[in-house]
Image (tube, helix red, strand yellow):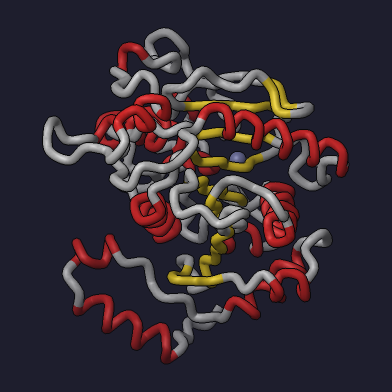
Amino acid sequence: MKARIPTRLLAGFFVLTALPLAVMAQVPMMPLGTTAQACHAFAQRLRSVDEAKCLALELRADAGSQSGFPLVFKDFAPRPANPDAPRILMIGGMHGDELTSVSLSFLWMERLQTERLQPFHWRVIPASNPDGLLAWPSRRMNLGGIDLNRNFPSADWDASALDYWERRTGSDPRRFPGAAALSAPETQWLTAHIAAFQPHAIVSVHAPYGLLDFDGPQKPPRRFGPLHLRQLGIFPGSLGNYAGVDLGLPVITLELPHAGLMPSPSHAQRIWTDMLTWLSENLPKRAYSVWHPPLLRPTGGERPTDPSAHLSAFPPTFLRRSDSPHDQSRVPPPVWSTE
Ligand SMILES: [Zn+2]
C-alpha cells in the first residue's frame, strides 16, 4: 500500500505537533466530514437508519473520531419546556460491532423528536465509535484498536487496567484498554460531554447479551421489558466504573439480545417505557443548578440550590468503594465482560 498522506492530514499533523502534548490529549480533532455525510454513511451501513430521517434530526458534531469522522449528538428538550428537568445522556455504539445499539438510539431519537410529553432533557450520542461501526466488517474497537469501554479515566485505571487486560483477558485485542486512560479521541470526547452536559443519569446501549446492568448508588431496576437485571461487576476503564462508581451517577447499561437484529417493536417499546418509569421514580423531580458528581464533590464550598432535591437524587450521597455492590473483592468481574 502506498503511503500517500492527504495534504489536509499533513497540515493537521503540523498543527497538532505545535500543541503541547497535554493540550492534544484534551482536544479531539474537529470532524473532517459533515453531519450530512455522517447520515449517509449510517444509512448505508444500517438498514434501520433512514437517511432523510437522520438529516431531519439536525445532528450536531463538535469533534471527530480518530479518522476524522463526525462525532454526532443531539439534544432533546423536555416537553413541556422545563429548565430544571433532569438531564439524561444516552450513548450508543461504543462498540462498533453492536449495530443494534446504534439503530435503537436512532429509533429513540426519532421518538423523542415527536414525543409530546416527556420530562427529561436528553442528549443522545447515537454512534460513539463510528470508525468501528463503519469498518468492514464492523469491529468493537476504535481505529487505534482501543476498546473505548476500557479507556475511561476510572480511578483504578493506572493501577489496574493493563494488568487486568493481560492477566484476566489474556491480552484479548478486543479488550485493549489503550496505552493510557483517555488515549482514544472518542473517549476524550465522551468524557468532555459528561463534564459539559452534567447528566443525572447515563444510558449506555450495547449488545448482544440480552440483559440489564446497572452501576451507581441507587437501587438497581429489576427489569426493563425483556431485559432482566444481571450485574456484571466493574472493569478498569469502563464507563460504569468511571461514571457509576467514581462519579456516583446512575449508569444504565442496556444489553440488547442481538447485535445485528433489532428488538421487536413491542420489546423496544417496553424497554423504553420501563426505563422512563424508573428514571421518573429515581431521579430528582427537578435538577439542581450546581452539579457535582457526588464522589468528587468538594467538602464545604458550593451547595446545591435545593439540598433536599439533591438528597433525594442520590441516596446515599457518598458511596465508599467498600460499600459498592460491585466491589471487586466480592464480585469478581467475569472475563467474558459484556459492557
Ligand atoms: Zn458492548
Count of numbered marks: 0
Write the residue at 36% across / 56% down. 196
Question: How far across and down, in percent of the image, does residue 285 sit?
Answer: 49, 36
| Residue 34 relative to residue 49: left or right | left
Does residue 92 appear left or right of residue 158 in this picture?
right
Which residue shows up at 32% across the image and 23% down it?
A: 317
**Residue 170: percent from the left, percent from the top?**
48, 29
Residue 287 sits in quarter: top left
Instruction: Relative to 22, say whether 232 is above or below.
Output: above
Task: Tell which of 135 and 266 is nearer to you.
Answer: 266
Q: Horizontal and vertical percent for residue 18?
A: 19, 79
**Of all residues shown, which one is farthest toward the bottom?**
7
Q: Is residue 111 above or below residue 337?
A: below
Specify whether 30 is left or right of 281: left
- The answer to whether residue 147 shows anywhere in this view is no
Tell me the quadrant of the picture where the C terminus can be found.
Answer: top right
Residue drawn 70% across and 75% down? Answer: 55
Residue nearer the viewer, 114 or 4: 114
Which of the 4 quarters of the picture holds residue 267?
A: top right
Where is residue 278? Give x, y as percent: 61, 29
Give the image quadrant in which the ligand numbered 1 is located: top right
The residue positioned farthest toward the top in the image shown? 330
The extreme left residue here reads 300
152 to 294, vertically: above or below: below
**Residue at 35%, 31% in the rendered image:** 310
Left or right: where does residue 310 sit relative to residue 127?
left
